[in-house]
Amino acid sequence: MSEKIEKVKCLIIGSGPAGYTAAIYAARANMKPVLYQGTQPGGQLTTTNEVENFPGYPDGITGPEMMIELQKQAERFDTEVRDGWVTKVDFSGDIHKVWVNDTKEIHCDTVIISTGASAMYLGLDSEQKYLKLGGGVSACAVCDGFFYRNQEVVIVGAGDSACEEAHYLSKLCKKVTMLVRRDEFRASKIMAARVQNTENIEILYNTETEEVLGDGQVVTGVRVYNNQTNEKHDIPATGFFVAIGHKPNTDIFKDFLDLDETGYIINVPGTSKTNVEGVFVSGDAADHVYRQAVTAAGTGCMAALDAERWLASKDSAFEVSTSNYN
């Protein structure tokens, strides 16, 4: 171990809307939070050009700008925001042990997990190019669908989430082309029927994406192929949506926390509590339903309040036990 063990009252792992909101509440409660930003400071929202559905921004704001403002607000109340990422934890004992960058060991009274989830993409070079440019590739129809009003878009996916997102886009867009890799949906029958019965959704079965087409700045179409006949054709589109799932960033917790089959942390319903006392979860690391910035922020608030109350109950118990000796 290259560094001395540090003791922290409240450690926050992750820096998206959930992490920063937890930090704001924890700092105002005098919990002296320390927040590690992780491998993607600011979380998924830093890849979003325009955020128009977060309350308080009537003219909208870019994702990176919002994260900068949230960080400043957390730091205003003396949150210590640090670079680095948590590489290992040990929640097996009374002391919550966390290692940062494989070197620094921290002993924490409470831990708030805000590590989020990462959208899964196809991995095509052209897809990643326009994703990074903010030029028409997205993994969130609810977040970005508004920008494609009265336009033609393509969405990839065959599960319930893909059907839900395609149906959402159909209310905004002129046409939605849905690419399904197999000859049937993976979605439930009711969700599949919903898109099949929507007039402006065209479903192409046995179809995969070969390339996302563009002019170097924005998406102009999608080249697809039939995986049965190898026939190729181009689909004009200004937006390319990927709905093939999310992977929660929770691998380092799997030996200590209860996770569902996908890897989302299971919390006590109505709270941010996990199966380990003193460890709380917020944001997309536990939320596989909504995955919105505003809901993540709300659960960040819950986690900080739950952590504060847990600490208070421990302090009260300590005071009662020591008073027996007076």
Image: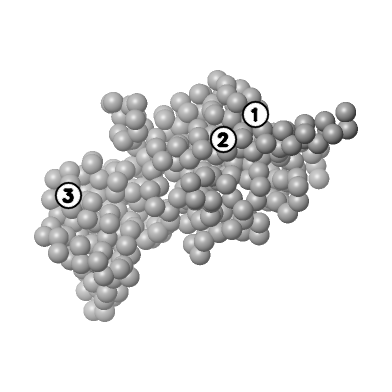
> Tag 3 or tag 1, which sits nearer the N-term?
1
Quadrant of residue 111 within the rendered picture: top right
Give yes or no for contact between labels 1 and 2 (Cβ–Cβ under 8 Å).
Answer: yes
The amino acid type, in three-letter code, at marker 2 is Ala
Q: Secondary structure at mark 2?
A: helix
Give yes or no for contact between labels 1 and 3 (Cβ–Cβ under 8 Å).
Answer: no
To which residue does mark 1 refer? Answer: 31
Rounded to the nearest angstrom, the CA distance separating label 1 from label 3 is 45 Å
Closer to viewer: mark 1 or mark 3:
1
Where residue 314 appears, x then y in whole percent? 71, 37
Q: Which mark is residue 171?
A: 3
The amino acid type, in three-letter code, at marker 1 is Met
Where residue 273 appears, x then y in whole percent? 57, 47
* Residue ID at (58%, 30%): 26
> Tag 2 or tag 1, which sits nearer the N-term?
1
27 shown above or below 207: above
Where residue 172 appears, x then y in whole percent? 17, 47
> Tag 2 or tag 3, which sits nearer the N-term?
3
Residue 5 visible in rendering = yes
Q: Which mark is residue 304?
A: 2
Quarter placement of the C terminus: top right
Of the pair 158 and 256, the residue shown nearer to us: 256
